[in-house]
Amino acid sequence: MGTLAADTTGGQWRKSSYSNGGNDAQCVEVRPGAVRDSKNPAVVLEFGAQGWQRFVKHISNG
């Protein structure tokens, strides 16, 4: 469904509003077509358009 890649494309990352912030926070950050862990931002899980739509639908449904 997705592929791992280095973060070289740029773009605006968004952190969950449920994130508690702080230095020890473990947050998932997203931008269209990609997801990453805030503790390891150099590694990105990228999706094609169809894969991204399935991913968003799946997490929206719980």
Image (tube, rainbow, N blue to C red):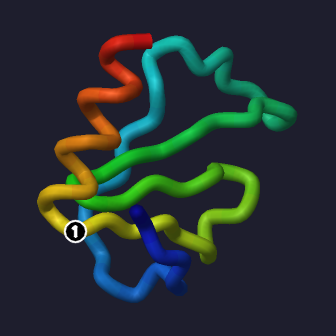
Tell whether 19 sits left or right of 55: right
Q: Kindly identify the residue that appears in the image at 22 percent across and 68 percent down.
A: 48
Left or right for 38, reference 62 = right
Residue at the limit of the structure toward the left, as seen here: 49
Residue 21 rendering spot, x and y as whole percentages:
66, 24
In the image, what residue type sits under mark 1? Gly
Q: On the picture, is 51 further left or further right than 6?
A: left
Residue 44 is left or right of residue 46, and the answer is right
Pick the front one: 35 or 25: 35
As drawn, which residue projects farthest toward the right? Answer: 24
Identified at 13% across, 61% down, the residue is 49
Foreground pick, 59 / 30:
59
Number of numbered discs: 1
**Crowd band around label 1 with a 10 angstrom C-alpha radius: few (<14), some (14–19), many (20+):** some
Quarter of the figure that contains the N terminus: bottom left
- Location of the C terminus (image quadrant): top left
Rendering coords of residue 32 (x, y %): 21, 54
Q: Secondary structure at mark 1?
A: loop
- Residue at position x 54%, y 56% from top? 36
In percent of width and height, residue 44 lies at 52, 69
User: With respect to residue 62, does 32 lie above or below?
Assistant: below
On screen, residue 56 above or below 30: above
The residue drawn where x is 46% and y is 25% is 16
- Height in image: 16 above or below 55? above
Look at mark 1 in the image and give the residue it sits on. Answer: 48
Spot occupied by residue 38 in the image (x, y as percentages of width and height): 64, 50
Is the residue 9 above or below the residue 52 in the image? below
